Amino acid sequence: MFDALEVVTTVVVGLMVGVEFSVAFVMNRILDALPEDSAQLGHAHGGRMLGALMPFWYIGSLVLSAIWAVAGWHHQGTGLVVTAAVLLIVSVVMSVLLLVPINNRNKTWTTDNRPADWKQQLDRWQRYHYVRVAVIVAAFTSLVAALT
C-alpha cells in the first residue's frame, strides 16, 4: 500500500508539473503570438478553465505528499518528501498571494473593460509563474529522489 502511495503521489505531482510547464513554455508563447489583443482573451479563457482545476490539483498534491511523509516517517527518503511538501506549500502560497489575484482580474477582462496596464499584469503573472514552475519542479525532483 505504501508503494502505491509513493507512485500515485509522484505521478500526480509529475502530471501537474507537466501541465504547468506546458502553460509556461508552450501555451503562453502560442497565445502571445496571436494578433492584437487575442492573447489576453486566450489567457482569460485558459485562466477560467485551469483556474477551476488547479486548486484541487495543488492541494491534492500537497495532501498526498503530507500523507506520504507521515506514513513513511521511518523510511529512507522521508526528508526529501518533507522537502517536497514544503515546496508545494510554497507553491500554494505563491499561487494564492501572487498569481490568483492577477488571474481573477484577467478572467473578467473584455476588450471593453480591461485596464491600460493589462499587458504588464500578464507579464507579471508570467514571471511569477516561471518561479512557481521552478518550485514545483524542485518538489517533483525531491519526490522522485525519495523513491530510490
Image: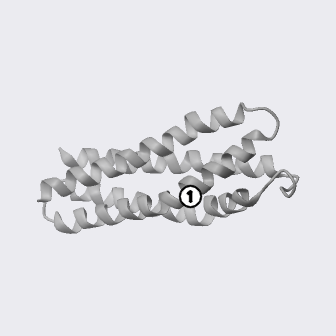
Residue 74 in percent (x, y) is at 13, 64
Q: Position of residue 87 (x, y in %)?
A: 42, 57
Residue at 69%, 58% in the rendered image: 107
Determine which quarter of the picture holds residue 71: bottom left
**30 left or right, relative to 141:** right
Q: Dividing the image into 4 quarters, which one contains the C terminus?
A: top left
**Coloring scheme of the render?**
one colour
Of residue 23 and residue 45, the one placed in the foreground of this image is 45
The number of discs equals: 1
Place residue 14 in its image quadrant: top left
* 94 versus 40 height, above or below: below
Q: Residue at x 56, y 54 (%)?
A: 49
Residue 13: image location, x then y, percent: 36, 51
Q: Residues within 10 Å of mark 1 (few under 14, many from 20)?
A: some
Say which element carries label 1: helix
The residue at the point 35 percent across, 56 percent down is 84
Residue 109 or residue 8, whichever sits in front: 109
Whether residue 12 sits left or right of residue 113 in the image: it is left
Residue 60 percent across, percent down from the top left: 37, 63
| Residue 50 vs residue 101, the one in the foreground | 50
Q: Which residue is mark 1?
A: 51
Q: Is residue 76 left or right of residue 123?
A: left
Image quadrant containing the N terminus: bottom left
What residue type is disc 1 on?
Gly
Tell me if 90 is positioned left or right of 141 in this view.
right
Quick check: 20 above or below 107? above
Residue at 76% x, 40% y: name it.
Answer: 38
